[in-house]
């Protein structure tokens, strides 16, 4: 079966750095997305990785290792507004998008 | 401003009633999608449409129906056949039908069946 694993919940302190991991077991791989979703709102696009390595975009970076079936989202200089759920989604060999359950990130002052 | 609108944001219905959720986009996107989001689970695809007058079932289409008569509109009907309809429903669109396209989401409709 297809599976995407993310921690259910994480807590971090304002101003700190947090890494949210995503591991996947899917039938093939054609890309990986990270989305941010504030409670009760629409998910919004953060990043897309298809090749191994680190993609940096301001305070957010996303890393991919296809051989390990692993990605992480790195958030630096955390702000209270970063409190949200972070969704990992993988494109499988049939070009279907498989979504993880999301990681709820709680930022404390 | 371009975007996706869903209405209403909250919807209450009695068990056994059909209900239609609205989704409209003015992004001129070809493809549109309906997802269901339940606590502790990833988004699950209900239906998608890559072109007007054509749509395909997703992973959990049973008890749902859709239409795509206009490019900008993709309404979802939750029928009485859906066993557990209470959920958060998200509509999305992409410029093309390819999976690697960024999905733009509407604000969602929270449906509660009493």
Image (cartoon, coloured by chain):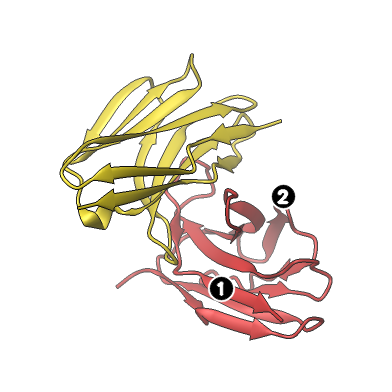
Could you tell me which secondary element the residue under label 2 belongs to?
loop
Q: Can residue A30 be spotted in the picture?
A: no
State the quadrant of the N terminus of chain B.
bottom left
Q: Secondary structure at mark 1?
A: strand
How far across and how far down the image is residue B5, in percent? 45, 74
The residue labelled by disc 1 is: B110
Q: Mark 1 vs mark 2: which is more N-terminal?
A: 2
Residue B47: x and y, percent?
67, 58
The shade of chain A is: yellow
Tell me if residue A36 comes above or below residue B21 in the rendering. Answer: above
10 Å crowding of disc 1: few (<14), some (14-19), many (20+): many
Q: Which residue is mark 2?
A: B59
Residue B39 image point, x, y percent: 58, 56
Q: Chain of mark 2?
A: B
Q: Please tell me whether residue A3 is drawn above or below residue A80 in the rendered image.
A: above
**Visible residue check, residue B113:** yes
The chain that appears red in the image is B
Q: Is residue B10 left or right of residue A94?
A: left
At horizontal 41% and vertical 71% (from top left) the residue drawn is B26
**Drawn side of residue B53 relative to residue A83, left or right:** right
Q: For the residues marked 1 and 2, what is the alpha-carbon distance in whole angstroms?
A: 20 Å
Name the side, left or right, on which B39 lies relative to B86: left
In-front residue for pair B70/A40: A40
Q: Which mark is residue A62?
A: none
Residue drawn at (40%, 42%) of the image: A34
Above/below status of A11 relative to A50: below
Residue B3: which quarter of the image?
A: bottom left
């Amino acid at each position: 079966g297809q599976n995407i694993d993310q921690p259910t919940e994480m807590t971090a302190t304002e101003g700190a750095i947090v890494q949210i991991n995503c591991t996947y077991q899917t039938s093939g791989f054609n890309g990986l997305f990270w989305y941010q979703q504030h409670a009760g709102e629409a998910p919004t696009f953060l990043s897309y990785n298809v090749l191994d390595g680190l993609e940096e975009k301001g305070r957010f970076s996303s890393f991919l290792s296809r051989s390990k079936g692993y990605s992480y989202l790195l958030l630096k200089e955390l702000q209270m507004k970063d409190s949200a759920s972070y969704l990992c989604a993988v494109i499988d060999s049939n070009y279907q998008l498989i979504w993880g359950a999301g990681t709820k990130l709680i930022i404390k002052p | 401003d371009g975007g996706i609108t869903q209405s209403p944001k909250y919807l209450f219905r009695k068990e056994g009633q059909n209900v239609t959720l609205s989704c409209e986009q003015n992004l001129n996107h070809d493809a549109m999608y309906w997802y269901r989001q339940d606590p502790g689970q990833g988004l699950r695809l209900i239906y998608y449409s890559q072109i007007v007058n054509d749509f395909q079932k997703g992973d959990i289409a049973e008890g749902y129906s859709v239409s795509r008569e206009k490019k900008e509109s993709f309404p979802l009907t939750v029928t009485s056949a859906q066993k557990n309809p209470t959920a958060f429903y998200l509509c999305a669109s992409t410029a093309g039908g390819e999976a690697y396209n960024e999905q733009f989401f509407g604000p969602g409709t929270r449906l509660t069946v009493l």
